């Protein structure tokens, strides 16, 4: 769903100048400015949920961080930091039982930023779908393991499907459509970039994030 520039400025209380300043500072992605024909000529629209959430975050954080820091926090840029068990104990969104499964399947005890975000995504799913058992998680995590190392950014979604109480996971780019077997029911979509923004803000100091 889209929102027009006129309605966006009205609903958020920001000015035209602020909007385009934030665009120049890379706080709002260029691709979110969508030009479409209208009865008045050409009008600019935005993905409604994304832009409203982004402006809310900017308004809440602009007095705490510089615009350069905000750009790093809100961007899909990833940290090169490696995360250990000790780090995971700090992150309250992480389910430590799932960490043990990741350690077993990946055969390592430290993980990249993207892998850490995926662990949080599965943790979010587990919190909501508590009836899913360990065997299902082992199967899902095994299913996406080979793709985790290929991800270069966090502009992806974790998709969870169900079929007769068997669960399947998939990773899909935010900009891609997914056409799956109609026998699979899509039960959860988790955006990795949303998790990333929250983690960068919440744990910026305690985990000492550095972004190149």
Image (tube, rainbow, N blue to C red):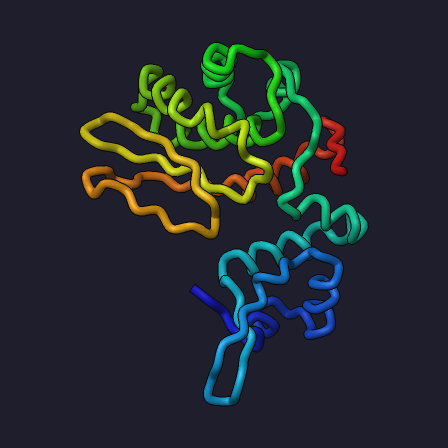
Location of residue 121 in the rendering, given as x and y in whole percent from the top left corner: 48, 32
In the image: residue 142, left or right of residue 43: left
Q: Along the line of sight, which residue is nearer the eye, 175 or 161?
A: 175
| Residue 184, quarter of the rendered image | top left
Q: Can residue 93 be seen in this view?
A: no
The image shows residue 94 at horizontal and vertical percentages of 53, 24
Task: Tell me where residue 189 sits by quadrant.
Answer: top left
Residue at x 68% of width, y 32% of height: 203
Q: Is residue 83 left or right of residue 193?
A: right
Rendered residue at 35%/46% (across/down): 178
Q: Which of 133 and 114 is in front in this view?
A: 114
Residue at left offset 41%, top offset 31%: 125
Task: Give the image location of residue 107, x and y in percent.
Answer: 52, 10
Q: In this view, does 75 lie to the left or right of 98?
A: right
Q: How many labels does the image show?
A: 0
- On-image quarter of the C terminus: top right
Q: Which of 182 and 91 is in front in this view?
A: 182
Where's the N terminus, which quadrant?
bottom left
Residue 156 appearing in the image: yes
The location of residue 68, given as percent across then percent down, is 79, 50
Where 19 falls versus 202 (above or below)?
below
Q: Residue at x 64, y 16 (%)?
A: 84
């Amino acid at each position: 769903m889209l929102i027009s520039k006129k309605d966006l400025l009205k609903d958020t209380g920001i000015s035209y100048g602020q909007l385009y300043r934030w665009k120049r500072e890379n706080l709002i992605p260029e691709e979110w400015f969508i030009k479409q024909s209208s009865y008045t000529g050409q009008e600019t629209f935005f993905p409604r949920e994304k832009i409203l959430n982004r402006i809310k975050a900017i308004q809440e954080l602009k007095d705490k961080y510089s615009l350069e820091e905000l750009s790093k926090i809100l961007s899909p840029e990833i940290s090169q930091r490696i995360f250990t068990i000790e780090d995971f104990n700090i992150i309250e969104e992480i389910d430590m039982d799932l960490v043990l499964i990741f350690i077993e399947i990946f055969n390592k005890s430290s993980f990249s930023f993207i892998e850490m975000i995926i662990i949080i995504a599965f943790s979010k799913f587990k919190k909501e779908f508590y009836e899913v058992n360990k065997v299902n998680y082992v199967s899902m995590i095994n299913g996406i393991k080979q793709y985790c190392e290929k991800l270069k950014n966090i502009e992806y979604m974790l998709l969870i499907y169900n079929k007769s109480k068997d669960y399947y996971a998939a990773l899909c780019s935010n900009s891609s459509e997914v056409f799956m077997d109609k026998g699979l029911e899509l039960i959860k979509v988790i955006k990795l970039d949303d998790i990333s923004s929250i983690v960068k803000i919440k744990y910026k100091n305690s985990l000492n994030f550095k972004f190149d």
